[in-house]
Image: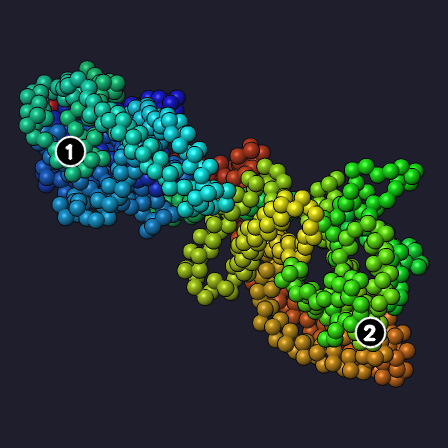
């Protein structure tokens, strides 16, 4: 309400009708000029605007729009002026209008919608439709235009009518938006509109309170009858929809009545102030002005203009400019015409270049800060999803379960089945149950905790065996479930990728349930029954832990792979998880802003794609932007996916109070996928800073070098790949059974990369074969290190030299930005040459040739002689 009252006072100031400062007392004929400025970004101007109005009988001199008491030509503004001329111009033909580009920054350019000129004697309106920029840096770059008078067909043109109707519908007819965009001339004030909005809001609240009991009953009955629409925690029933419709209908009626009351209310009828002013100027105009004001009415086709040119729509009560301007004591004392500031071609070109540099400067600054904000949001979201306690948790569990310091029960050194049973019976099982404290005190409130007294098992742990297709024929009466195959659907397990094979989710299951003595007894029986034998291919032990101290879940998987060579390969994996979707309000706000930024970047890239088409994919910046957008969209999708998975696990945990086995394997996969997208998003986001610093000569050389060398690098990569693959096949086939580094193609490739970097110990090759090993190593070093890498360095050097010599250095914009920055903070002072150049340009702009001014002086002299005679 305070804002509305403040803006209403500002609107009153905008309604002033300003007589032109170059009007003189001897003027016999008057025109009202309405200038409509567009609502586009930076449409307003502070430049000096001048014009020449031409008609069938005569044309005006150069006239200037000015107002010493208020700002004119603001964005979306409507400015009214009174122009006096010696005699009627007749039917108007065109208006020649321009500005001197003297505004600063974004206030130099001007977007003119249209101009309406009204003959105050005949009350006839003339429309001059522009819908164009007067700017050196936009559209055609013109700041001077000749606008002919619009015909009836042009006034009814679809684009012209649509722009007026659309703006008027939003700014005036929409109750809520009009509080901020209400036309200044409209009698329905902002305070009145704000009152109507509060009436509508409070009426809706009152009616909702009346129907609150019915809404509560409908909400409680949704469990039995079901809801027709459910979106997460929101449930909408038919009763709630009906209540909403009734509340809207009942609250709409009083709101419409109040709105119509305020719209139809009128002030006391009085003669418009413009006619009082005209009467003060020339008494004989009183009769004609009143006659045409009440007998000849204006058309109501243009609602926006009619608010100003209506009989009572012009207010000059507070306008002192014109009253002061007519107080002349002598007929010879008239205001001299102001000099005409019209830019020549050179000045126009310089102004255009300066404006383009300024636009580019602000575009760079805006792009830099927008992207810096976006990267900050990415980093906050990414790093808030990683917890330092995760490392400490994993480090503790590895030392706790693996027993790497013990010789007899070291999990990482298990090589036989008996050693595995020994670790299982004596180390692992003992750690699954919390036992007495170090001082033999009894345990309290530690039911379900493991022996470290910090982590609680969710449900129980399971041991799953995968074996070749045979049947376990032992005595199934002892532990029946361990000798029955269970599918992955019943176990809620998934495919697992080990070091040597990929394993399915089913298997033979043993559950670690019961007391510690029972667990040890059951494991002894399984050992005696040879539950693990030569047909076993893999043993999984899976358990889920929760540490309440750091609020972390941990999915632990112990895998022992039994290879065909009778060797055993033990591995372990601990995956900490945090099921909190938003750990703080900051993270929630950053996520919302992050999604908004993604939508903004998508819109920008779609526009660039339509502009550049296939050339879009040839730019380094475009590929980085695509990487950011794809990873960001993946983040959003996986984030929602993880939320649903966490919701499912939380619901299962709540229903069972944690006394059931909950497998977090799928949640781990989803969390890893989210980490993957976040990591690459941060990677691409950081790489983009190379593009943002493209105006630095040294930093831009990196991208320019890659751009010039891309074709040669592609050819070199093909050649190098062929050479590398040939050596890979050679080393793998020769030393697959002799060197551990050549046991697989991947490890062989790793060995060759180490040889390329000269970080490989050749003793293994010599030990494998005294002759072939050193020979292959020498050939590899000669061809790859000395030849291929030298070619690669030569390609980079040539491209770097070419990029440095042919670099398109945009140091002008960089120095322009630096000079503006130093000028803003007041550090750099202009040199004498710069000051002298500015003074010369100012003198040139203010200089007027006397010969050019001679006709104007003669006209003024003849006008004075005519008055005297």
Comes first in the chain, label 1 or label 2: 1
Q: Label for residue 534?
A: 2
- Quarter of the figure with the N terminus: top left
Classify 10 Å Cα crowding around label 1: few (below 14), some (14-19), many (20 and above).
Answer: some
Residue at the location (44% across, 52% down)?
603
Residue 765's disc is: none
Report the front residue among 349 and 565.
Answer: 565
- Give the CA distance from mark 1 to mark 2: 105 Å
Q: Quadrant of residue 591?
A: top right
- Closer mark to the observer between disc 1 and disc 2: 2
Question: Where residue 866 appears, x then y in whole percent?
Answer: 10, 26
Q: Quadrant of residue 330?
A: top left
In this view, 803 is above or below 128? below
Indicate the position of residue 680 as horizontal and vertical percent values: 62, 56
How many residues crowd around disc 2 within 10 Å: few (fewer than 14), some, or many (20 or more)?
some
| Pointer 1 with pointer 2, Cβ within 8 A | no
Identify the residue at horizontal 16%, vertical 21% (top origin): 272
Residue for point 68% across, 55% down: 663
Q: Which of 231/319 is in front?
A: 231
x 41%, y 29%: residue? 212
Figure check: 193 above or below 487: above
Work out whether residue 161 or residue 706 is closer to the camera in this orientation and state it: 161
Q: Secondary structure at mark 2?
A: loop
Quarter holding residue 115: top left
Q: Which residue is mark 1?
A: 118
* Residue 760 at x, y percent in the picture: 83, 70
């Amino acid at each position: 309400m305070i804002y509305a009252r403040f803006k209403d006072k500002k609107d009153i100031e905008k309604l002033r009708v300003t007589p032109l400062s170059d009007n003189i007392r001897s003027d016999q004929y008057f025109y009202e000029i309405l200038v409509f400025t567009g609502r586009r970004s930076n449409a307003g101007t502070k430049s000096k605007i001048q014009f020449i109005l031409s008609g069938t009988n005569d044309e005006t001199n150069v006239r200037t729009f000015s107002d010493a008491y208020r700002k004119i030509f603001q964005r979306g503004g409507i400015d009214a002026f009174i122009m006096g001329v010696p005699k009627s111009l007749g039917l108007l033909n065109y208006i020649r209008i321009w500005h001197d580009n003297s505004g600063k920054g974004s206030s130099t350019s001007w977007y003119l919608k249209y101009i309406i000129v009204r003959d105050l004697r005949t009350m006839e309106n003339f429309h001059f439709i522009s819908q164009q920029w007067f700017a050196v840096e936009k559209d055609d770059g013109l700041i001077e235009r000749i606008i002919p008078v619009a015909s009836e067909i042009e006034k009814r043109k679809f684009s012209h009518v649509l722009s007026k109707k659309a703006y008027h519908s939003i700014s005036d007819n929409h109750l809520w938006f009009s509080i901020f965009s209400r036309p200044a001339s409209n009698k329905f004030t902002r305070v009145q509109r704000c009152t109507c909005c509060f009436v509508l809001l409070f009426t809706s609240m009152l009616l909702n309170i009346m129907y609150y009991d019915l809404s509560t009953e409908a909400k409680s009955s949704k469990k039995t009858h079901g809801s027709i629409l459910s979106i997460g925690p929101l449930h909408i029933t038919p009763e709630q929809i009906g209540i909403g419709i009734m509340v809207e209908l009942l609250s709409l009626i009083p709101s419409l009545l109040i709105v119509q009351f305020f719209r139809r209310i009128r002030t006391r009828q009085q003669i418009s102030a413009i006619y009082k002013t005209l009467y003060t100027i020339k008494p004989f105009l009183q009769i004609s002005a009143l006659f045409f004001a009440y007998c000849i009415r204006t058309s109501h086709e243009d609602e926006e203009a009619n608010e100003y040119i209506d009989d009572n729509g012009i207010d000059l009560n507070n306008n002192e400019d014109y009253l002061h301007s007519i107080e002349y004591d002598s007929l010879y004392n008239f205001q001299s015409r102001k000099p005409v500031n019209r830019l020549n071609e050179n000045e126009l070109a310089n102004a255009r270049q300066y404006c383009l540099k300024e636009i580019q400067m602000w575009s760079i600054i805006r792009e830099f800060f927008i992207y810096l904000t976006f990267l900050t949001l990415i980093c906050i979201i990414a790093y808030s999803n990683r917890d330092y306690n995760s490392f400490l948790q994993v480090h503790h569990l590895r030392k706790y379960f693996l027993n790497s310091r013990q010789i007899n029960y070291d999990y990482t050194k298990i090589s036989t089945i008996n050693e595995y049973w020994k670790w299982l019976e004596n180390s692992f099982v003992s750690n699954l149950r919390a036992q007495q404290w170090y001082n033999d005190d009894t345990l309290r409130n530690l039911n379900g905790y493991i022996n470290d007294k910090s982590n609680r098992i969710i449900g129980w742990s399971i041991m799953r065996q995968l074996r070749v297709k045979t049947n376990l024929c032992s005595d199934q009466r002892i532990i029946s479930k361990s000798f029955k195959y269970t599918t992955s659907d019943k176990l809620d397990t998934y495919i697992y990728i080990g070091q040597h094979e990929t394993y399915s989710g089913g298997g033979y299951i043993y559950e670690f349930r019961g007391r510690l003595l029972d667990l040890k007894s059951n494991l002894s029986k399984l050992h005696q029954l040879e539950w693990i034998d030569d047909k076993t291919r893999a043993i999984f032990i899976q358990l889920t832990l929760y540490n309440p101290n750091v609020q972390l879940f941990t999915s632990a998987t112990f895998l022992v792979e039994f290879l065909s060579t009778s060797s055993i390969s033990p591995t372990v994996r601990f995956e900490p998880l945090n099921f909190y979707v938003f750990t703080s309000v900051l993270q929630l706000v950053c996520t919302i802003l992050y999604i908004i930024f993604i939508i903004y970047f998508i819109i920008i890239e779609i526009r660039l794609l339509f502009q550049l088409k296939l050339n879009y994919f040839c730019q380094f910046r475009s590929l980085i932007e695509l990487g950011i957008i794809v990873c960001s969209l993946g983040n959003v999708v996986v984030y929602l996916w993880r939320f649903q998975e966490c919701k499912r696990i939380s619901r299962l945990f709540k229903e069972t109070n944690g006394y059931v086995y909950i497998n977090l394997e799928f949640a781990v996969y989803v969390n890893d996928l989210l980490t993957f997208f976040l990591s690459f998003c941060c990677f691409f986001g950081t790489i983009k800073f190379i593009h943002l610093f493209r105006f630095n000569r040294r930093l831009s050389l990196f991208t320019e070098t890659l751009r010039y060398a891309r074709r040669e690098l592609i050819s070199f990569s093909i050649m190098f790949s062929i050479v590398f693959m040939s050596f890979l096949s050679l080393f793998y086939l020769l030393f697959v059974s002799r060197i551990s580094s050549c046991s697989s193609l991947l490890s062989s490739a790793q060995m060759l990369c180490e040889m390329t970097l000269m970080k490989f110990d050749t003793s293994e090759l010599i030990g494998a074969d005294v002759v072939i090993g050193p020979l292959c190593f020498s050939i590899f070093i000669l061809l790859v290190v000395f030849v291929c890498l030298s070619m690669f360095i030569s390609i980079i050097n040539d491209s770097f030299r070419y990029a440095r010599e042919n670099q398109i250095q945009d140091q002008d914009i960089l120095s322009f930005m630096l000079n503006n920055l130093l000028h803003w903070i007041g550090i750099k002072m202009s040199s004498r040459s710069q000051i002298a150049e500015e003074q010369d340009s100012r003198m040139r702009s203010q200089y007027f040739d006397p010969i050019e001014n001679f006709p104007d002086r003669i006209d003024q002299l003849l006008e004075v002689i005519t008055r005297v005679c």
